[in-house]
Structure formats: C-alpha cells, structure tokens
C-alpha cells in the first residue's frame, strides 16, 4: 500500500471514530458525495444502517473552478464524464447485494434534486461531502435540517480545510451557525458535527 493510500485510510478511520461518538448501529444514513464508495463501505460495515441513501451525480465539471476537484478538469479532457460513469457503475456493482435487498438506495442526481423525495425527520446521520463550494454546502445544510431527526447529526467533511473550494465548507457552516439554524457540537479531524437548533 503506498503512502497516499495509507494516509487516506487513516483519515477515513478518524472520520468513523468521530461519528461513532454520536450514533449507533441500525441508523438511517444519508451520504451526499459518494465518489468511489470507499467511505460508504466503512459506514456500512461500522453502523449496519437500517437504510442507507447514497447520493452523487457523478457528473464531470469542466469549469475552471473544478479543475482540481475529484470530478472536474478542463474542456480538453474527453474522458472526464466516462471516468465518472465508470465510477458510478463500480459503486453500483460493489453494493449490488445491499441495493437488491433495499438496504442501500443509490441515487445518481444532484443532492438538491433528491431532498424533496425524502421523508422529513427521518435520518440519524446526514454526511455532507459533496460539492464543497459555499453555495452548495449551505444548500445541503439547509435541506438537511428538514430531513434530520431531532436527535440526529449532520456532519460536514473538510471543515477548516481550505482546498480548491476556497474554504466553502467552513464559511457555509459558520454562516448557518451565525444565523442560528445549526450549532457546532464537535470538531475534530476536519469533521464538523452539527445539530439543528430547536
């Protein structure tokens, strides 16, 4: 295993340790931003969710803003969308058993298109790791407030991690806290755990 994979696994394990402080097994989970499904698999193994929604558009973004993202690049890359289509097919294959049983609901759409299909006050955990730019994160948090249970948690990945997204995660979380929609209850390993304000 190369150093990059070791560091990625270490980061992922730390994310699970953060979440374990707040939810138990058989939780209802929504993950926004699935990528290759590596973290989805860890959530599945650790929490054995009753129902697990995986949402990602697997859509190639050619705009300059996204050139350093995991799903972007530039106009001259003809294989960009093909790579994302392949990634989606791999995720679908890897979770075939859970999709067939109904435990996993795999949805290939933008998150804002999906929220109106979901039940209110339903999820124990909503994990936000999709588009990290300010407007997208703010919209994901806003939409999550209707769907999370009163005692559930929303977790935003890459909090206080500037990245190509111009620290959009941190800015969106802080703005929503300032407007008194959410409160930060725990921050560690770039994971920001949020509760909705009652």
Image (cartoon, helix red, strand yellow):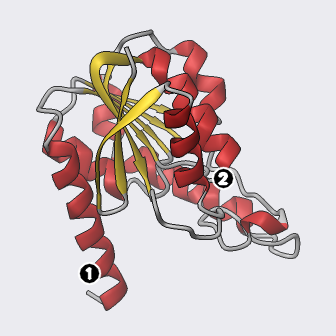
Dividing the picture into quadrants, the one containing residue 39 is bottom left
Front residue of this view, candidates 38 and 99 = 38
Identify which residue is drawn at 56% across, 21% down.
115
**Which residue, given by chain and number where applicable, does mark 2 sit on?**
133
Bin the neighbour count of mark 1 within 10 Å (Cα to Cα): few under 14, some 14-19, many 20 and up.
few
- Distance of mark 2 from mark 1, alpha carbons? 27 Å
Q: Which residue is mark 1?
A: 6
| x and y percentages locating residue 191 in the rendered image | 34, 54
Residue at 81% in and 70% down: 78
Secondary structure found at label 1:
helix
Q: Farthest residue toward the bottom?
A: 2
Image coordinates of residue 38 in percent, x first then y, are 34, 58
Q: Decide if residue 97 is on the left or right side of residue 128.
A: left
Height in image: 139 above or below 188? Answer: above
Q: Which quarter of the rendering shows the C terminus? A: top left
User: Residue 178, relative to residue 158: is it above or below?
Assistant: above
Task: Name which residue lies at 26% across and 71% down.
Answer: 9
Residue 81 against residue 117 in the figure, above or below = below
Label 2 CA crowd tier, 10 Å (few <14, some 14–19, many 20+) = many
Check whether the beta carbons of the residues at disc 2 and disc 1 lie within 8 A of each other. Answer: no
Residue 37 placement (x, y as % from top left): 39, 53
Label 2 element class: loop
Marked residue nearer the N-terminal end (2 or 1): 1
How many marks the image carries: the answer is: 2
């Amino acid at each position: 295993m190369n150093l990059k994979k070791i560091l990625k696994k270490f980061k992922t394990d730390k994310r699970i340790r953060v979440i374990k402080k707040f939810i138990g097994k058989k939780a209802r989970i929504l993950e926004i931003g699935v990528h290759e499904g590596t973290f989805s698999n860890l959530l599945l193994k650790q929490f054995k969710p009753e129902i697990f929604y995986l949402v990602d558009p697997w859509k190639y973004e050619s705009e300059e803003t996204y050139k350093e993202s995991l799903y972007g690049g530039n106009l001259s890359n003809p294989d960009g969308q093909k790579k994302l289509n392949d990634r989606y097919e791999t995720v679908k294959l890897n979770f075939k058993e859970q999709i067939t049983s109904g435990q996993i609901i795999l949805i290939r759409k933008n998150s804002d298109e999906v929220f109106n299909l979901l039940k209110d006050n339903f999820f124990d955990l909503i994990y936000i790791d999709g588009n990290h730019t300010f407007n997208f994160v703010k919209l994901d948090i806003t939409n999550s407030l209707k769907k999370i249970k009163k005692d559930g948690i929303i977790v935003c990945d890459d909090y206080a991690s500037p990245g190509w997204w111009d620290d959009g995660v941190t800015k969106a979380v802080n703005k929503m806290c300032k407007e008194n929609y959410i409160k930060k209850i725990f921050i560690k390993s770039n994971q920001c755990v949020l509760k909705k304000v009652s």
